[in-house]
């Protein structure tokens, strides 16, 4: 086994799908198409083979969290409310983690019918474009220093404390924080946090971001595949933006196709690949589960952390 995965059990898709047979009603392809990201691929078979056993594993982690809260209550001789189960989902740009996050939310909502499942992305914790320009970080957007790490840590703390929180909203169409708009999160039972920086460590003197997560997933694939998915997504975004002058990608639609494609390639090489090597990939081994993808976003291997 690759030394990078030495602390993991590598489980083939064929073995994984037989670890647990779920009684959850399968999703339809129409439901999957409604939640998948641009150029991502996911099928009903993927749900049955990979995600339903994964949901059962999350169920076990949730039961463990509830048992620990009950035990702490016995020790302190008082009622201790179980904090929300927080699931972190990370991976490279364009690897399909947003689809994974939305699918997990949908499946968990069905598995826990009487509980609330919320999803947030760390994009909302990016500094606004104006603030990035002020700080000289425009070309570093997506890198750790472009996020308001203290605000993200405080959000996670408030969630674990059972408080209601409002967080900023990010628009991929305008490529910026939406001024005056917020997402309200009302103390959920399960919270999914998705983003490239989810497993990174914007530590202060007392708190590490991993302290807040109860279960973590890293979506993985070979670099050349991710690059191809990034370029495919870029082309799809151009198609969507061609009649919308307010869209961030509209200006690229006015360029010759070869020139726009070269800009996308340069962005991958100079920004996203650097970010992947320096910050995202080094956080992979903090995940409890690594979902490894191959062609067409098919998951072929699941890595489960040993300890």
Image (cartoon, helix red, strand yellow):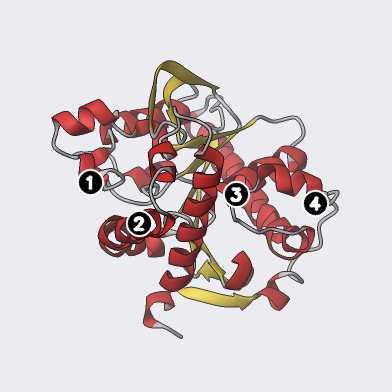
The residue drawn where x is 30% and y is 63% is 269
Report helix, strand or loop for mark 4. helix
Query: Mark 3 Cα within 10 Å, few/some/many (few <14, many 20+)?
Result: many
2 or 4: mark nearer the eye: 2
Circle 4: is it few (<14), some (14-19), or many (20+) Cα within 10 Å?
few
Lower position in the chain sequence, tag 3 or tag 4:
4
Could you give the CA–CA distance between mark 2 and mark 1, rounded to whole angstroms? 22 Å
What residue would you read off at disc 1? Answer: 140
State which tag comes first along the sequence, 2 or 1: 1
The quarter holding residue 31 reads top right
Q: Residue at x 54, y 55 (%)?
A: 96
State the image coordinates of residue 297 (x, y, percent, origin top left): 60, 65
Q: CA distance from mark 2 to mark 4?
A: 36 Å
* Residue 254 image-quadrant placement: top left
In this view, 122 is above or below 289 = above
The numbered disc on residue 99 is 3
For label 2, the crowd category at 10 Å Cα-Cα, with few meaning under 14, some 14 to 19 and many 20 or more, is few
User: Residue 214 versus residue 176: which sits nearer the camera?
Assistant: 176
Q: Earlier in the sequence, mark 4 or mark 1?
A: 4
Decide which of 183, 269 is in the foreground and name it.
Answer: 269
Disc 3 versus disc 2: distance between alpha carbons? 29 Å
Circle 3 SS class: helix
Residue 112, above or below 288: above
Mark 1 Cα-neighbour bin, 10 Å: few <14, some 14–19, many ≥20 = some
Q: CB under 8 Å between callouts 2 and 1?
A: no
Q: Which residue is mark 2?
A: 259
Residue identified by numbered label 4: 29
Judged left or right of residue 220, residue 118 is: right
Residue, x 42% and y 23% (percent of image)? Answer: 167
Q: Are marks 4 and 1 in contact (CB under 8 Å)?
A: no
């Amino acid at each position: 086994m690759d030394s990078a995965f030495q602390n993991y059990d590598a489980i083939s898709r064929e073995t994984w799908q037989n670890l647990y047979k779920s009684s959850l009603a399968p999703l339809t392809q129409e439901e999957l198409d409604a939640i998948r990201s641009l150029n991502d691929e996911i099928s009903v078979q993927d749900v049955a083979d990979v995600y339903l056993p994964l949901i059962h594993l999350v169920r076990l982690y949730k039961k463990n969290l509830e048992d620990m809260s009950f035990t702490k209550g016995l020790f302190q001789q008082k009622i201790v409310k179980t904090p929300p189960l927080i699931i972190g989902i990370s991976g490279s740009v364009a690897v399909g983690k947003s689809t994974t996050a939305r699918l997990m939310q949908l499946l968990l909502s069905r598995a826990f019918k009487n509980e609330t499942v919320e999803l947030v992305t760390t994009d909302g914790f990016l500094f606004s474009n104006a603030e990035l320009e002020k700080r000289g970080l425009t070309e570093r957007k997506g890198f750790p220093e472009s996020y308001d790490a203290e605000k993200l840590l405080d959000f996670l703390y408030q969630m674990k404390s059972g408080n209601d929180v409002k967080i900023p909203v990010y628009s991929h169409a305008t490529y910026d924080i939406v001024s005056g708009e917020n997402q309200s999160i009302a103390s959920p039972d399960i919270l999914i946090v998705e983003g490239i920086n989810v497993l990174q460590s914007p530590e202060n003197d007392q708190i590490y971001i991993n302290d807040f997560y109860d279960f973590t997933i890293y979506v993985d694939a070979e670099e050349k595949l991710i690059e191809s998915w990034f370029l495919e997504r870029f082309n799809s975004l151009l198609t969507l933006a061609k009649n919308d002058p307010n869209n961030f990608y509209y200006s690229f639609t006015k360029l010759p196709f070869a020139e726009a494609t070269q800009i996308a390639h340069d962005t991958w090489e100079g920004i996203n690949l650097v970010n992947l090597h320096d910050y995202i990939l080094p956080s992979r081994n903090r995940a409890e589960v690594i979902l490894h993808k191959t062609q067409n976003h098919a998951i072929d291997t699941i890595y489960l952390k040993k300890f």
